[in-house]
Amino acid sequence: MARPTIGIWIVGARGSVATTVMTGLIALQRGLVEGTGLVSELPHFAHLQLRRWPEFLVGGHDIRNTPLIETAEGLAGDQRALPPSLVQACRRDLLRWEKNIRPGTLYHVGDRIASLAAGPSKRLHELPSKALARIQNDLREFQKRHKLAHLIVVNLASTEPPVDEQALPRRWSDLEKLLTSETCPLAASSLYAIAALDLGWPYINFTPSSGSSPRAIQELAELRQTCHAGCDGKTGETLLKSVLAPMMAQRNLEVMSWVGHNIFGNLDGKVLDSPENKASKIRTKDQLLGHILGYSPQTLVSIEYIQSLGEWKTAWDHIHFRGFLGTPMTLQFVWQGCDSLLAAPLVLDLVRLVQRARENSEQGVLPYLASFFKSPLGVRDQAMSSQFEMLLDWARHVPMERSR
Amino acid sequence: MARPTIGIWIVGARGSVATTVMTGLIALQRGLVEGTGLVSELPHFAHLQLRRWPEFLVGGHDIRNTPLIETAEGLAGDQRALPPSLVQACRRDLLRWEKNIRPGTLYHVGDRIASLAAGPSKRLHELPSKALARIQNDLREFQKRHKLAHLIVVNLASTEPPVDEQALPRRWSDLEKLLTSETCPLAASSLYAIAALDLGWPYINFTPSSGSSPRAIQELAELRQTCHAGCDGKTGETLLKSVLAPMMAQRNLEVMSWVGHNIFGNLDGKVLDSPENKASKIRTKDQLLGHILGYSPQTLVSIEYIQSLGEWKTAWDHIHFRGFLGTPMTLQFVWQGCDSLLAAPLVLDLVRLVQRARENSEQGVLPYLASFFKSPLGVRDQAMSSQFEMLLDWARHVPMERSR
Amino acid sequence: MARPTIGIWIVGARGSVATTVMTGLIALQRGLVEGTGLVSELPHFAHLQLRRWPEFLVGGHDIRNTPLIETAEGLAGDQRALPPSLVQACRRDLLRWEKNIRPGTLYHVGDRIASLAAGPSKRLHELPSKALARIQNDLREFQKRHKLAHLIVVNLASTEPPVDEQALPRRWSDLEKLLTSETCPLAASSLYAIAALDLGWPYINFTPSSGSSPRAIQELAELRQTCHAGCDGKTGETLLKSVLAPMMAQRNLEVMSWVGHNIFGNLDGKVLDSPENKASKIRTKDQLLGHILGYSPQTLVSIEYIQSLGEWKTAWDHIHFRGFLGTPMTLQFVWQGCDSLLAAPLVLDLVRLVQRARENSEQGVLPYLASFFKSPLGVRDQAMSSQFEMLLDWARHVPMERSR
Amino acid sequence: MARPTIGIWIVGARGSVATTVMTGLIALQRGLVEGTGLVSELPHFAHLQLRRWPEFLVGGHDIRNTPLIETAEGLAGDQRALPPSLVQACRRDLLRWEKNIRPGTLYHVGDRIASLAAGPSKRLHELPSKALARIQNDLREFQKRHKLAHLIVVNLASTEPPVDEQALPRRWSDLEKLLTSETCPLAASSLYAIAALDLGWPYINFTPSSGSSPRAIQELAELRQTCHAGCDGKTGETLLKSVLAPMMAQRNLEVMSWVGHNIFGNLDGKVLDSPENKASKIRTKDQLLGHILGYSPQTLVSIEYIQSLGEWKTAWDHIHFRGFLGTPMTLQFVWQGCDSLLAAPLVLDLVRLVQRARENSEQGVLPYLASFFKSPLGVRDQAMSSQFEMLLDWARHVPMERSR
């Protein structure tokens, strides 16, 4: 097996998605599984010669203490999410990667997330600038120890309460000054984004938290000539919305109301059960209908924590629409998906594609990754098919020479 | 109101879809309803200056006797499909159009359809050539009487048993010879297609019956320099398949099985309840998955006649797929649509768009109408989004001058 | 047609349920419809010789002004709830009954309901004792004018915010004293209950509001030797809970979670959209699982106002349970019922059965009516089958002689 | 652990249900699981002092060769039905019980089942009398070897094609004579029933096959003073029908149509995919609606083999009913149950309860076991609640002294 040369640094490294990313990556590295669920394994991207799985190594931050193997075994046991035999086969590597995880920061993560903290994170009360320095130190130390070319930082941590981005300075030089203040309004996700981008390394925001979205942080990416993408992985109900709503539009059917109820029981669900964290999530799940339809039907999106469901996110959507001569009709769907297993392959895809963008010296937001996100940075088109077309189009035109 | 100049000639003119087409067209002509459900009313097509509703007049063939107004009142009453007040408002015109309906042919429609015949059709036992002459006579008589520029013929009759198209001659000159034989294997739908195309008038096949699909009839369209489109209107479950299956493909999710159960209770349902007629329908509903996915999952499509449902076609689809690391997940949908109200606006759209093609002197199959059909003639791509893109692309490039 | 001798006095007489009760009763009186949906028309009750439909006349209170015929036509039009022809056939009687409606009281109905007030009710700010006197005056005036033997009062008004019944005095003599105080904590529904019972007339609470539930008001019923029943008609989702939960218990299947989402768009839905009113409703929808199962699974009940649905209440329930060897399984149901058409026949049934109880000189709570209610007064058993068995048992044993 | 004294002899011992029965029984004997899903563990039956789990030992017949442990590991692996750790814990006992399985007979099992035969069964072509002698020999040998008081025989084999029971002689003395003929119309399930009953041992038919249903075999049970019960375990969709249909009846709602589509992918599903075997099953699933409702709505029941679902039987039921004033409404449910895990505990319950009946010297059909069966022998009442009441009633009155 080739020596890994690229680090994947996961914020929220002990969560279900992160654990599934790692278990899946190990399984791919060892040839134990096929590429089902991985967009980057589709034939359309074969000519891109994306980095192979053994070239990646994982480390990360987390505010909790639970060992990776414990999370993995939970996912394989009661949750019925991972195949038990696979977890056993990956056990040794998981124990090894465990050592690459460092204490995360609790700066502005909200009370719900803060209450989950365990171990060293719990005791940390630091200025943003202090947190930033510590994070960058962890990143560099990981790079150096494993002789990695560079890292790609991915945010998989639980959703933070919303930040008022309009109130932030729009220039990096102005935002930077706030970092030394106790009243700096940025949340943890943005500190990690700054840490990565400032070192010239790509940042991927797979959550609805603020991350690299603020204008000033986007400028930082450009200043440091690196790239980033986000926000909020489009894994289930919203993915369906982004294919069904265009169909309604194409047929000139008038959506009168669209109700979506989501129930699930993993830690993300528990965090979202707190109203302030939920607000961030619902905003991103709800906005795309207006974009696609060109008008705003009555919508309702709920996300509720139902413990017994564990990883099995179940969504019921009820779409009430009007057809010819005003006749009301109904489409309902029930989605029963395993949350972490839907998210994890997209994370691996994003890492590979962002890596390819880096090799192509791309900078700033990568808009052609829109199909992966509920709220794609820099893209207004929310229809899955045209977003995917953007990705294919990029793949068709990306030059073959690369700077590594 | 402008005098109509274009005839819409409907085969199966007394059926639910045809009655809804007429009621809807009258309502549009009188400004009683808006364009909901009509694709041709989308802003993308505004610049095409499609013919306005008052420019159309309807006539047709049917093998049954039931008055239009009776069917319309049934749709407004127990069926809860049409608004009762609308039917009343359209009553006078429906009685007038009633006079434009002529007896259809029973040639090779199958026993189930034949058993529905009433009135003059019942007594007709004619050679194909005889039927053809009679049909063309009806068409010309309608044109002359109403001083119409030309007709567009649309097949809305119940599904016929399948015809073995491979066994037919591939040249028109050879097929034509068979028309005088009692063993001519063509079915009624193809006779209507020949009647229209031979007169240089367009033909639209909104059903899975053979219609203009045989190679030799396609050649006839080219010889007479006219155009045609088909087959089988994509109204409900299959429409959903054509947006959901591409999503599965784009995410590299492996569809293991796709089960679709359809229940409904109108006359079409009764005809499809006969195994030989059902065979035609299921073939067209079932084929597109393989095209889109690139492999063939286990599929099951059932169509069952449940009388109490009337027009309200209900489909339950159960899609069992495998995600990352092989984890099985499920998507189910329930579609509760009013069959005739989904089909009727597409018929009106097709007539307007085919008319525009004629004004543009287009000949042969019109492939950019694929998004309207379950089995689009001349197009292999079954994904709704790319089919719709073809239509937009045509609309963007169609020249503005026109031959009327 | 026989002259009516019994008055049905409906609180909330202009609402959808009340309008449907009246339209249905008129239709039954005129022999326009059959007994579908009426429990009291089942053969089990034939020997009871329940009062026939023409023996009833309707009047009532409401705080709004909308004419009955307007509500009825709305239910027949866009709502697709009542057959339009039926409403036309009942039109004249509805206009006549319109005159029997008097302004209701706004005392402690909550801000949401108060905001709906129109006409005289809007201007009323009265002490409970004053409201009570006015209500009783209306009741007696109706009785006298139509020469009725007596009235049965039914509460169909929108759900009020919850009242803390524990804080009320438990004796009627103590509660009565509070009625002259501006701080009397009773809500309107209880004032109507007191008005009826105090006159010796039965009271039926078809809503989750307080009504006759307070201990002191129950004592009043006994003091005046009359009877009452409640609370909260069991029409849809809760009806299903009361047959499905016993099945789970009988099979020793462990319900881990039971999620129920209800969406609908009539006025009741709008009122329930206010958190304080919703609280009353959810409490009564949610409690029965614990009673039936003997333990409390995680439950979630939501009721949301989705305007486009109108009367068509749609409930999605997701029941997650554990079977043998702990294997998790799922039952989901979707209920699409027309709210007023489910409630109205039960109201008519209750009136007839309560009338029969009165003829049998029964006093206090009538526990054998439990199967009609979500929170049956005086009965803990929540299983539909045993509740229905109680009703059959009463019917089998009720004496045939009667005091009228 | 007590020495077992009662043998459970399973026909179809290598199937999924049987394997789950054995794994579950072992797990109960070893205290590894709780009683979830076991009716006989409900508090209502505690006073009956039913036999404890360690008192039972399992043997059986099968026509296939697949080792139990292989089936069990399949159920724990891809099927996600049994917990993998539990199968490991039961491994040694399963290997031991493996030795108690003998080759079954193929007499009149239908071509589909016959095609599954492997090992010695494949080579057997025997007269009924010969098969019977061999079966009885196997039973007695098992009893003797393990010093068991007696056996209880349970049929869990795949569904046979229907037998015309009306054409059979009604007296045992007449039926017995047919056993030596090559044209004896009985199927295998009845030969096993005769084998057991003739030895004075109880027989339970958990399938829709003929078993002990023929009148003459029922007489045999009485002649030998033993008891029997059947047919066809009520595990999923039909269980729901038997609670939902009574609700419709109690509310006088008119069921217009009831459509039920069942999909699953285990061996039973494969056998049922053959039309002749499916006929038996559908008959028993479909009949109960007429019994409960008192009229026959249009019904449709389909059972289809969808391989990817394995043990996870999914049923979609669409119930179209009419309420007050004729308004049509809809109830749909989706049942996602693990077939073998729903059936297995009922088998264990039946064995314990039949054993108790035997200790109580009961003879002939045991009607109070009706709630366990789709087509209960000797009982017309199909409502779950009254069937369960019969069981409770028996339990309340069964005498405490017992003959062992």
Image: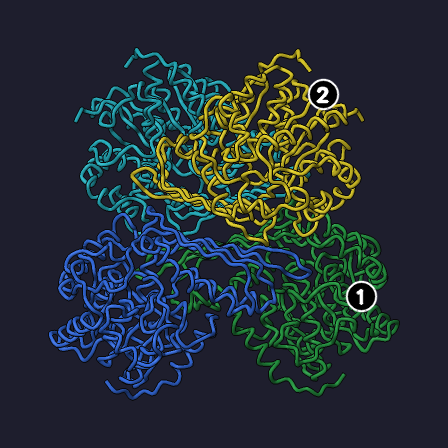
Chain colours: A blue, B green, C yellow, D cyan
Which residue is most to the left?
Answer: A145
Left or right side of A69 for D264: right
Classify B396 as above or below A233. Answer: below
State which chain disc 1 sits on.
Answer: B
Classify C68 as above or below C218. Answer: below
- The residue carrying mark 1 is B59
The crowding category of the residue bearing disc 2, from other C-alpha atoms within 10 Å (few below 14, some 14 to 19, many at least 20), is: few
Q: Which mark is residue B388?
A: none
Q: What residue appears at the point 67 percent right and 82 percent down from the top-left corner? A: B362
The crowding category of the residue bearing disc 1, from other C-alpha atoms within 10 Å (few below 14, some 14 to 19, many at least 20), is: many
Q: Which mark is residue C149?
A: 2
Q: Quadrant of residue D96?
A: top left
The reply to whether residue B388 is visible in this rendering is yes
Share a chain, discs 1 and 2?
A: no
Quadrant housing the C terminus of chain C: top right
Which residue is most to the front?
Answer: C181
- Image coordinates for residue D324, horizontal then vertical, percent: 65, 37
